[in-house]
Image (cartoon, coloured by chain):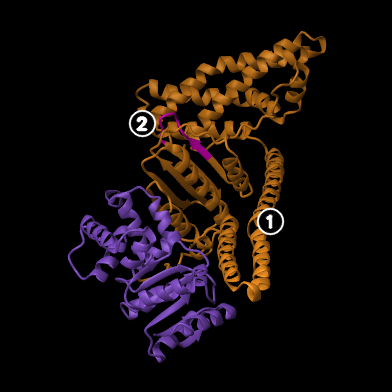
Chain colours: A orange, B purple
Amino acid sequence: MNQQAGPLRLTGFAALQLLMFPLVLVSLILVVVGGTLTLVTVGIPILLGSLPALRWLADRHRLLAAQTLGHDLPSGHLPTQGMSVLGRLRTWARDPMTWREIAWALVVVPIGFVLSLLTVLLLLAVVTGAFWWFGAPHIMRARATVDRIFLSPGHTEELEQRVSDLTVSRAMSVDHSAAELRRIERDLHDGAQARLVALSMTLGLADDLFERDPDAARKMVAEARDTTGAALGDLRSVVRGIHPPVLADRGLSGAVQALALDMAVPVTVDDGLAGRPPPPVESAAYFAIAECLANLGKHSGAENGWVRLSWAHGVLTAVVGDDGRGGADPDRGTGMRGVMRRLAAFDGTMRVSSPTDGPTLITLEVPCALSSPKTTPSSGTA
Amino acid sequence: MRLVVAEDNALLRDGLIRLLEANDCTVVAAVDNAESLTVALREHESDGAVLDVRMPPTFTDEGLKAAVAIRAEKPGFPVLVLSQYVEQLYARELLASGQGAIGYLLKDRVANVGEFVDGVRRVVAGGTVIDPEVISTIMARREEPVDRLTAREQEVMALIAEGRSNQAIASALFVTEKAVAKHTNSIFAKLDLPVAEDDNRRVRAVLAWLRV
């Protein structure tokens, strides 16, 4: 949505706004009438019809303003899903956005109407074509700005929204780390710890047998050595699950390269990172990509996969794609949910586009700073 | 064999020295960081180096960088890199640092003293010794030109990459040495390797197989 619309397109918007003008006017009148009549109940059905209509019209104007200005306009209504009629009306009355929309219809629409009309007339009058060409973008931007001022949530509402988002993501992060700790405890308990117990028993037995049966004792020592190897293997996999050493050594780029090399499906890595994100972000992004690649290997049936890493305007972006059969559902499977929870702690997001028959495209975005340019790893290698 | 050992953990360093000296190797210098390693290699005449990946000051991949740097300065100098964990990425970097005389093993492998010392000998003699854990991830990959090898040839190739001799491969696969020689010749042909002495071809085969 960063593309700015041209004069012709903007005039199209103006025409749409002109068409919607009578509708806005009618719904405004109905809302006001309905509002005053709620005392005698007849107003309730009128409001139930007219308020959503006004909201819908406001949403159209938000979209047009967003297209004109080249950036998103959040709407931020209080949720009313599953509420009773009265509950819905009460929420609407409480919602500052409702009052903003009414004020918008009251004040802005007449002004906006004039601005949109002017844009269209400048074009229709032909002789004013030059004015139109240069003026339309300015006029329409002015109208969109006014729309935005009235139709965007206020500072307080934004902060409230932010606080509630943060409360949710904090709860998720706490849940996630508690679950991780439980998993690590279980892995250590069932793996390395159990093997070390077995090891000490085997060595104790061997100690007893050395005098009486040296051959059996030697066999036990050999067994003990195998157990040590298995315990080390367990510890390695636990360490990988906590913080993979290659990530510490080489950062996200190197670690993703290492992941790609270990895949059965050929995966190319396009590394566009000029530095390193902060370690916690790096780790969250790494595990997210690892999960995506694991799913790619297990479910996609792809011939080829690829990972693209980039950073721009304070946002780290990782795109994982494949040419497989698609149909990936991020809500299915605990792995992806864990990834989202982990990313949410950093205001990170994950988008999945996976139509049936593919291709699958997963976009991970995490806002973060990037540290100084990386030092080239082990200079001299080909 | 005269070796230089670099390992920052004193317990493991002493263990390594004891183990190597008990097997007819002389440890001419034992250091605990990459910088001292460079100095030690300059001061002492040695046949090879055994080093740990993780060393001071950053405790990341100093040993690996040191190995590559040493081989840039002294091409073909035998280096065996030990690590608590192995990465295919690192194996490739090491292999790319020159033709052969390179080893990359998990520290666990030291427990099997006979095989470990044999690995050191092979590296010093110019061979390539790659950890079975790296090999197994490569075996899982389905890509050309590895696909052209038969299942048996794949098995033989994996053992070559681990640094085993034909004799060792024969006993591991329960076949005759002659059969192994037949497989290796077929592998060399399929990987389009030019005719050369056997050791050199083995090193080249590993490089081709890993697509370094």
Q: Which circle, 1 or 2, is nearer the viewer? A: 1
Task: Give the residue type at disc 1.
Answer: His
**Residue farthest toward the bottom in the current orientation of the protein:** B43
Q: Is residue A286 magenta?
A: no
Badge 2: few (under 14), some or many (20 or more) residues near its Cα, within 10 Å? few
> Up-down: is A157 above or below A191?
above
> Up-down: is B33 above or below A266?
below
Task: Give the residue type at disc 2.
Answer: Ala
Q: Residue at x 68, y 69 (%)?
A: A204
User: Which disc is residue B38 wearing?
Assistant: none
Q: Residue at x 63, y 74 (%)?
A: A210
CA distance for labels 1 and 2 = 78 Å
Q: Position of residue B68 (x, y in %)?
A: 38, 73
Quarter of image, res B127: bottom left
Q: Is residue A170 left or right of residue B147?
A: right
Q: Residue at x 42, y 52 (%)?
A: A260
Q: Is residue A26 left or right of residue B79?
A: right
Judged from the image, the secondary structure of the residue bearing numbered disc 1 is helix
Q: Quadrant of the C terminus of chain B?
A: bottom left
Q: Which residue is mark 2?
A: A130
**Residue farthest toward the top in the current orientation of the protein:** A42
Q: Is residue B61 visible?
A: no
Foreground of the two, A62 or B170: B170
Per the picture, the main secondary structure of the magenta-coloured stretch is: loop
Q: Which residue is mark 1?
A: A189
Q: Is residue B174 left or right of residue A256?
A: left
Q: Which region shows up in magenta?
A: A351-359
Q: Position of residue A64 (x, y in %)?
A: 51, 28
Q: Position of residue B16 (x, y in %)?
A: 51, 79
